[in-house]
Amino acid sequence: MAAVLFAAPALSQTNGIPLTVERIFAHGSLAGNPPEGLTWSPDGKHLTYLDGGELIDLDPGSGKPHVLVSRAKLAALSGAADSEQDRDHRDRYKMASYLWAPDSKHLLFDSNGRLWLYDLGNGTGIQVGFTDTASGDDPKFSPNGESISFIRNHGISIARPRDLSASGAYPVAAAPNPTTTNGEVDWVYEEELDVRSNYAWAPDSKNIAFLQMNESSVPLYPLTDWIPSHATVDMQHYPQPGDPNPDVRLGVVGTAGGHITWVRMPIHGGQDYVPRFGWVDRHTLWMETLSRDQQHRYLDFVEPGSGQGRQVLEITDERFLDDNYDIFVGEGNIVLTQWKDGHNHVYLYRYDPRNPMAPAAPEAKQLTSGEWDVTALSLVDQEHKQVFYASNEGNVLEQQIWKVSYDGQRAQLTTGAGYHDANFSPAGAAFVDRYSTRMMPPRLSLCQVQGKCNVFWSNTALEPYKLREPEQLQVKAGDGSTLYATLLLPAGASTPASVPLIVNPYGGPGPQTVANRWGDALLFDELLAQHGFAVLHADNRGTANRGRDFAQAAYHNFGPVQLEDQLAVIDAALQHDPQLDGKRLGWWGWSWGGSFTLYAVTHSDRFKAAVAVAPVTDWHNYDSIYTERYMSQPADFPTGYKDFSVVNSAASLKGRLLLVHGTGDDNVHMENSIQFIQKLIEAGIPYDLQLYPRKTHSIAGADVRTHLYNRILSHFEQYLK
């Protein structure tokens, strides 16, 4: 029997302003919107961010803000309205809306792909390369600041700010055909490998290295827009498990264009991935490759001129590797993270910077160790030989910022229980601390590494609502692992078996949902509690930041172990709080959580109502990189694809189901819901369906979010009350 090890103090009555769906979603976030685009200038003398339509400059020394670019000037630089797909793309992948020039005197604004070079001295902006709307993606300054590169028409173009009026922009690596891109990132690399750019300037500004992606063999999926009288179709290249992935190769081209030197790729296996690459020095490239089964990770050095290459290191795992692919290479040092000792930690390797191609194998030095995970590399300070990083050392539900020197000396830089994220200045002397707790929305502070922190943005708009903190539970899983959960009861609930319980896990690989940090989900949880429901969140085995073994519980197991853990937590909560009614259980989730919802209600008869938003219903339908990481290819694990795909268990559905999907979802395609519905029809099982035209996986927008969450609330009111 599962046992509750700890619970927080009992809940108290609240007299705050009642919540409604409209109050939460119709007018922007109740918790406020922190400034966007926090960016340090290269000289470290400016910290800028967008707030209220203005570009604010926060002086790193005094901490005083002032308007750097006015709302009127930014409005004049804005491009045409972008599409639903473009808005989702830029928001989901956090694409920068501006960047600093190397001289720290100019800014380049990216307004939906329309590029403007802004001179801080005279306050004027000029359009770069006369680009059309949405045609100047992934802009970059050359290291010497004399050129600006960007992606246009699926290839690389360059503009020179000094003579824009005369020459505009010119292509240096044009896309050779409609199915091949030079320097542009495809959907699956961007989504699953966290790739944000596929080209890099050489340190001397004379060459550009880029990844060419050939999608001619990648199958197409039709994204249909039914709103016009004549429906339109956008064909998306989307590799599913076992399908051909994009063929890739690495090229180098000079800034004048013309001849492309193709790098001799190291051959480690069929269709390796290239998550990251860059320049060791002006003559040598480094390239990270990942085997398709994601059990082997390599770092190679290559010389484009001579064609020589050598393998620098290899990292392996018999199941799958941790998915942080960031690597720092420079001045004889290589810094990366890996979990070969059971937890994700920082490792330092060395090479000869005078002769990077020397065949000597680098020796690894582990800079951090312990029963905790490094969750992010924030900055590698080469000058002072130290690494800034985030970790959950001391509490797996929290995150602090640390630094470690190359000789292993460590120091904690942030304080305060909760979750800290850092954005460091280029030299590592200062950083922005984004700090939140479960009950406190994010606040932003400017911190000196050797000094104190000063808050420069916070929001107190939630105080009148008097939100209540959920109880925290710890439950033992079947293998002895500790499972963390939170439980929010209606205020004043005391009558036995009077409160229906709604379970809302994500459950899949990646997100850690139970942590001491702010999440907007708390607002909807409180709303449900005000309507008489209890809400339970739990992280089962297979989720992140708990070490290798905990994460790898999801290997070849997309349902049974996760459901076992959730049921253990549910039973512990029912035992702990007699107010809960075990006969009125609900479940809802989004994305993997939506798939998990369908798995639960087709493999258990305990749930009376469920809502599944944007679920994968057949793992043959999802993308290759993600699915094969945990499930291998279909030919190698056919029983798993059959047993863990809920489309095959639809006839066993129990309880009342609301199925939700955006018709423009380019991540989890609508075919998933359609195929599941077909099985329900064949089995004669009733269901409710809610579609959102044109909406993508996020189903974003005040109007549709208000509609969606009212539907979720109504569904549980109808079938659990």
Image (cartoon, rainbow, N blue to C red):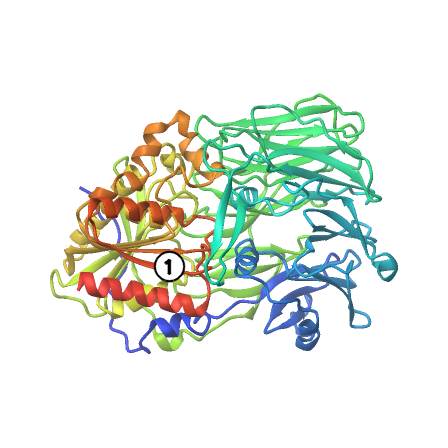
The quarter of the picture where residue 630 lies is top left
Quickly name the residue at label 1. Answer: 691
* Residue 591, percent from left and from top: 39, 50
Identify which residue is drawn at 61% across, 27% down.
Answer: 313
**In the rendered picture of this protein, how many numbered marks are placed on residues?**
1
Is residue 280 visible in the rendered image? The answer is no
Assign the C terminus to one quadrant of the image.
Answer: bottom left
423 is higher (above) or lower (below) than 284:
below
196 is higher (above) or lower (below) than 245:
below
Is residue 38 visible in the rendered image? The answer is yes
* Residue 339, percent from left and from top: 49, 34
Residue extending farthest front: 230
Other residues around mark 1 within 10 Å, as few (<14) / some (14–19) / many (≥20) = some
What amino acid does circle 1 point to?
Leu
Assign the N terminus to one quadrant of the image.
Answer: top left
* Residue 118, percent from left and from top: 76, 66
Position of 467 compared to 564: left or right?
A: right
500 or 571, which lies in front? Answer: 500
* Residue 438, percent from left and from top: 39, 61
Residue extending farthest top: 359
Identify which residue is drawn at 64% across, 44% down.
Answer: 386
Circle 1 — which element?
strand
466 is higher (above) or lower (below) than 418:
below
The quarter of the picture where residue 347 lies is top right
30 or 78, which lies in front? Answer: 78
27 is higher (above) or lower (below) than 432:
below
Position of 635 compared to 221: left or right?
A: left
